Image (cartoon, grey):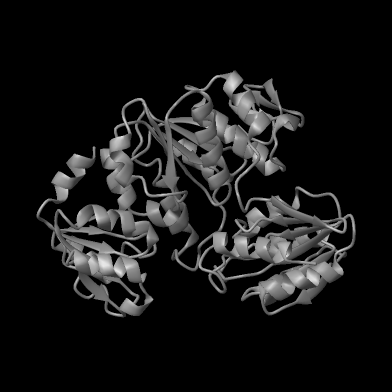
Amino acid sequence: MLKDFIADVKNKKVSVIGAGVSNTPLIRMLWDHCWLFVHDKKVESQLDPAFLAELKAHKVNLILGEGYLDKLDGDVIFRTPGVRPDVPALEAARARGASITSEMDTFFAHCPCPITAITGSDGKTTTSTIIAELLRAQGYDVFLGGNIGAPLLPRLDEMNANSRVVVELSSFQLMDMTHAPNVAVVTNVTPNHLDWHRSMGEYESAKYNLLARQTSSNICVLNHDDMTTRGFGERCSSQAKFFSLSPLEKGYSFDGESICKDGTPMLRADRLRIPGRHNIANFMAAIAATEHEVGEESIARVADTFTGVEHRIEFTRELDGVKYYNDSIASSPTRAQAGLMCFDCPVVLIAGGYDKKIAFDEFGELVCKRVDTLMLCGATADKIEAAVNNAKEPKKPVIYRYDDLKTTVEACRRIAKSGSVVLFSPACASFDQFPNFMERGRFFKQTVNELI
């Protein structure tokens, strides 16, 4: 509980790396109980003025700017996910005996109720949200967090043994995670974040770390269609359950019409309100993760009512017969490919963004098959255009290039014909022009809604 966490840090020297929004609740929890140092690469003028005033009022020690990690000497150090756990400053602190942790790892250590944790290259947020909805439909008091919503550590006192926690976790958070969830879900593992991870092997290891410390009393839910996650099932100590978009004798699968359990149909896929085969897979993963606690009546109710999560193939507007969809969550080629597979009408695709050092070869092939017009902007425009031009598919889309998203959307207004879809599914991260995919998606929707 919360008092146990406070007791753990009482009167210690505590360092928190990162003064951003995600760490704000943690810092506020700490500043009256320990000797607190906050380290951030930003300088004072770049911090939120109101929060900066709070920090100074509570006499928090600030180490800011380029050398923000130079004096990292706390007894307890909270690593922000954006800083690698093996940077020299953290390695030195670890060698002298400092406890290196994170907001999420600390939450796991003190959480009083079962935790279901979800990771993967694609589908994490939708799967996490469906799991939370299934548990709520069954009557549980559910807390959804991690990469979704507000931090969970400050909410410990709201939880009890009968609560349920659902958390979405990134590979950045998982690299040095020391606790295991009761139920672990890995949606898939495809190349991603290779600008941050040093190799694909390191990325896969980070994902596996979600279930590495599970025991035989725990459950892991894995994608049978993905070779990497299927291999996780052979290595882990927990009870492995699989889901697949192809028939399976054991586990959850799709027969073309219905979601099946152990080969027996249990729910027609056309009842799902969210489009796309990838969302059938997400729904199967969620059912598998909750089957020991959620009945078929609750499953059917969520299937009939859940309409999706913001920025995930989100219908934005229809204008002169053209439908606009926001799929800003698609920050990888595989996620954008899943979005493309949802539409059988002519598609005008907006793609491009920050370069995470991922190949676009398969994406280029599918673009040739499914896209009539490709609108490119952002740092990866050259790579995506090259992948399309080098694709073996003889049919090629018409390609246009623009400097920014606003200009691109305005060009779609002129180019897209009635009966077509404008799909904003970037296949890249947003960091070249926006701080995150949420801001990018909201900007897209605002621009679309301003079209006349």
The residue at the far right in this view is 418
Image coords of residue 309 (percent x, y) = 60, 46
Image quarter in which the C terminus is found: bottom right
Residue 43 in sight in this render: no
Viewer-closest of 89 and 418: 418
Q: Is residue 234 left or right of residue 443?
A: left
Image coords of residue 15 (percent x, y) = 21, 62
Viewer-closest of 382 and 77: 77
Snapshot quadrant of residue 254: top right
Q: Is residue 153 above or below residue 245?
A: below
Which residue occupies 41% across, 57% down?
172
Snapshot quadrant of residue 269: top right
Q: Is residue 217 above or below residue 447?
A: above
Which residue occupies 49% across, 59% down?
200
Q: Is residue 388 left or right of residue 418?
A: left
Viewer-closest of 83 and 396: 83
Snapshot quadrant of residue 57: bottom left
Which residue occupies 76% across, 63% down?
349
